[in-house]
Amino acid sequence: MMRQARSISAAKAAELAELARIVRIDSVRMIQHAGSGNPGSTLSIVDVLVWLYFHEMHINRADCRDADRDRLILSKGQAAPAYYSIFAKLGWLSENELMGFRGFETRLQTHPEYDTIPAIDFTSGSLGMGLSAANGMALAARYKGLNDLRFFCILGDGEQQEGQVWEAAMTAGHYKLSNVINIIDRNVFQGDRSSHDVMELEPLADKWRAFGWDVQAVDGHDFGALADCMAAFEPDKPKLMIANTVKGKGVSFMEGDNLWHTGGPKFDQGYLERALADLGVQHG
């Protein structure tokens, strides 16, 4: 039987909020130090990732490859700095490695690479592929009788313009992969413009429902709402959580500003200090 969603207390939500703040601090430091990266789309998904790894997902801190673990596929691989920061907090890599992000001789590449860090379940970077991987893992688990495992996939909203996503949506609906939980980081931006301007996605929820999914919308920065959303899903359908988020969440001058989709040379020390001050750090 598939694992049930976990309720959340106010104390636990406060603990997660502090963890999310620390992950955001790590993320902006890593990107600024590397001289490039994706701060906006990293910061928007931090709360969802923290909620999953430190509360909702069944994992084993002592063994990140435990066969009984839930899996997570970060299809929007550009959010890797948050991913790596969380791994460090879980003890799956050294804190000292974080500043090597995007270096030539490092495990912390721009997008997650399978087998570089044992905790990574799937290589991402070619956008739109993650849900297909989650489906394949879920079908393999069904074949093996591993019915309690869950497979979480995080997609960017720009990825909804990829044809492969809709092939995967059809597959999960057809096979009733109820242990696939797809989360869309709906920060309404993609590489260079609003997703509305590039290619309108709405009515997004209705499209997914047409493929046989149970769809819920949620505030992607509210831990209690995320837990309640997870508990509200129908048990026998694949599940889609449309997480309404703010690009650049937590850093005032990045919030809702797609100029910070990437953070290249403009992300200098002055901007870093402003970002860290927003995150409660007075000295970078």
Image: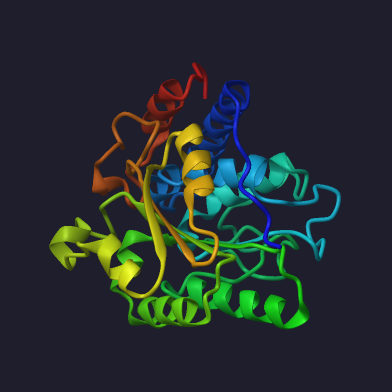
Task: Tell me: residue 143, above or below residue 149.
Answer: below
Q: Which residue is at the front of the view, 85 or 283?
A: 85
Query: Please, which residue is most extreme toward the top here?
Result: 282
At horizontal 22% and vertical 64% (from top left) the residue drawn is 201
Q: From the viewer's perspective, is 242 left or right of 33?
A: left
Q: From the viewer's perspective, is 260 left or right of 232?
A: left
At horizontal 60% and vertical 36% (from top left) the residue drawn is 7
Give residue 76's quadrant in the image: bottom left
Q: Position of residue 208 (x, y in %)?
A: 34, 68
Colour scheme in the image?
A: rainbow
Give residue 152's quadrant in the image: bottom right
At horizontal 75% and vertical 71% (from top left) the residue drawn is 146
Task: Tell me: residue 281, above or below residue 100.
Answer: above
At horizontal 33% and vertical 60% (from top left) the residue drawn is 157
Residue 103 visible: yes
Q: Which residue is at the front of the view, 239 or 15?
A: 239
Task: Tell me: residue 119, above or below residue 113.
Answer: above
Q: Position of residue 70 (x, y in %)?
A: 69, 59
Q: Which residue is at the front of the view, 276 or 54?
A: 54
Query: Please, which residue is most extreme toward the right here?
Result: 62
Specify the quadrant that holds the N terminus.
Answer: bottom right
Q: From the viewer's perspective, is 258 left or right of 265?
A: left
Q: Position of residue 231 (x, y in %)?
A: 53, 46
Q: Position of residue 153 (x, y in %)?
A: 52, 63
Residue 47 visible: no
